[in-house]
Image (tube, rainbow, N blue to C red):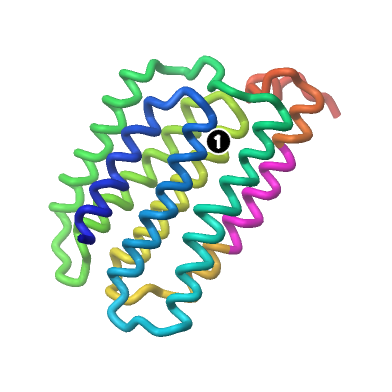
Amino acid sequence: MINILLIAFTISLIYIAMANRMLTYIRIIAFQGLLLFGIAFVELIEINVINLVFVLLETIIIKTIAIPFFLKFILDRNKITREAEPSVSNFISVVIVTLIILGSFFLTNAIRDTHLHKIFFIVALSALFTGLYIIITRRKILTHVMGFMVLENGVFVLSLAVGSEMPMLVNMGILLDIFVSVILLGIFADKIGDVFEEQDVEQLSNLKD
């Protein structure tokens, strides 16, 4: 079951690489949040009320519901429907993300550590580098937020890769960081939308003191 969820998460990384519509990005982010809940729920050795409440809060309420709805509000307010001219074509993006996944696989196999869950580490590295790739190659400011979300999801999976029991304090710090960051970036993108018609990162060079 856990392998199916991780494979589905990896496939979502390829799908987000060829997505054009911003709404598709949001749906994939919400779907990843749902997958992360299933992954964390199955992986926890000692399931108690505190762990279940935290997983529910971080994955279902925050990642799957709150943040996607917030990003959807930003999209509607600024009337954004499609990604504005990505730096590379969708085909090349799919190829690069596929190479990222394969590279993560070979890199993980080179690591000799009996305490490391390799399949988690492969998915985590794939998500981290895919998130960075989205940030680098996409021009919409809000799409950079989506890339940051994918990157953070990779950190969440990485926390499961280094131990069989989820480190609560680490994930609480991650949750606070991502929640505050998305809010600030969302507000920033919203204000930029009041100034520029297109939320292209290249437009930031026109800002004056």
Residue type for callout 1: His
The residue sitting at 38% across, 38% down in the picture is: 130
Residue 31 included in the magenta stretch of the image: no
Start and end of the magenta stretch?
Answer: 176-188
| Left or right: 86 in relation to 96 | right
Mark 1 element type: helix
The residue sitting at 50% across, 25% down in the picture is: 21
Residue 180 included in the magenta stretch of the image: yes
Residue 7: x %, y % from top left: 23, 48
Residue 81: x %, y % from top left: 59, 23
What crowding class fits label 1: few (fewer than 14 Cα within 10 Å), some (14-19), or many (20 or more)?
many
Residue 82: x %, y % from top left: 55, 21
Give whichever of 114, 8 is nearer the camera: 8
The residue sitting at 41% across, 17% down in the picture is: 88
Q: Using the image, determine if residue 132 lies above or below residue 45.
A: above
Residue 158: x %, y % from top left: 35, 60
Please state, as top left, top right, bottom left or bottom right, where the C terminus lies in the image. top right
Q: Using the image, determine if residue 108 lies above or below residue 141.
A: below
Res. 71 image quadrant = top right
The residue sitting at 49% across, 60% down in the picture is: 60
- Residue lying at the far right of the rendered structure: 209
Q: Using the image, determine if residue 24 lies above or below residue 117.
A: above
Res. 45 image quadrant = bottom left
Q: Which residue is mark 1?
A: 144
How many numbered marks have been drawn onto this rendered protein structure? Answer: 1
Please state, as top left, top right, bottom left or bottom right, where the N terminus lies in the image. bottom left
